[in-house]
Image: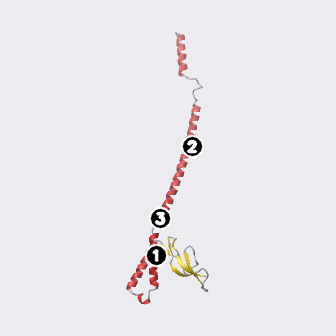
């Protein structure tokens, strides 16, 4: 019986322990896990960098959109203001042609107060007059209507303003129509 027991014991030992060539060693497993960890770390770094780039692009887009909307709001009333300018021009013409005997009339003073209120409103909206008389001609803000021979004035100097020009928040709203010296 002992021989028989030995044979059975050897058989069980062979079945329980597979050959050493098929069993990965602990160092090989550790190496594979480290490679997998490095690969995961590399992917994480790529994903993080991509996320950071996208976030920066989104913040830049948001900033640009806020500026664009701000400009849109800032200049939204431009059409309305352009329609008010001829009314202001007419007040200016009426004031210039007003006879001396009517300048102290209460009704005329009331109309001129309306002109002043209109000017104050335009200033509050960022509208400002373009200074022209005595200035050097600037094609960005002025339009020449006529060139006049004037010996006592330098060439290119504005000598008369036909129609006032205006800017809104520094941007041209309407060019001034002027006469300049030849």
Residue highlighted by disc 1: 85
- Point out the frontmost of discs 2 and 1: 1
* Mark positioned earlier in the residue sequence (2 or 1): 2
- Residue at the spot 40% in from the left edge and 84% down from the top edge: 108
The answer to whether residue 131 is seen in the rendering is: no
- Residue at the spot 44% in from the left edge and 83% down from the top edge: 94
* Mark positioned earlier in the residue sequence (2 or 3): 2
Percent of width and height locating residue 139: 57, 74
Residue highlighted by disc 2: 42
Residue highlighted by disc 3: 72
Percent of width and height locating residue 4: 53, 11
Q: Quadrant of residue 135?
A: bottom right
Q: How far apart are marks 3 and 1 (CA)?
A: 21 Å
Q: What element carries label 1?
A: helix
Q: Is mark 3 on a helix, strand or loop?
A: helix
Q: Is residue 121 above or below residue 36?
A: below
């Amino acid at each position: 019986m002992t021989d028989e027991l030995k044979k059975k014991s050897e058989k069980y030992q062979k079945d329980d322990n597979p050959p050493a060539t098929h069993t990965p060693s602990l160092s090989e497993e550790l190496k594979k896990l480290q490679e997998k960890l490095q690969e995961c770390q590399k992917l994480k770094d790529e994903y993080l960098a991509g996320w950071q780039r996208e976030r920066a692009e989104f913040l830049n887009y948001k900033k640009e959109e806020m500026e664009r909307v701000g400009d849109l709001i800032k200049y939204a009333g431009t059409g309305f203001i352009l329609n008010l300018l001829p009314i202001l021009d007419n007040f200016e013409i009426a004031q210039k042609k007003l006879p001396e005997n009517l300048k102290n009339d209460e009704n005329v003073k009331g109309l001129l107060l309306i002109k002043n209120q209109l000017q104050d409103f335009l200033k509050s909206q960022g509208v400002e007059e373009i200074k022209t008389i005595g200035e050097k001609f600037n094609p960005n803000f002025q339009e020449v209507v006529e060139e006049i021979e004037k010996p006592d004035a330098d060439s290119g100097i504005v000598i008369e303003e036909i129609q006032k020009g205006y800017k809104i928040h520094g941007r041209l709203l309407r060019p001034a129509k002027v006469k300049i010296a030849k």
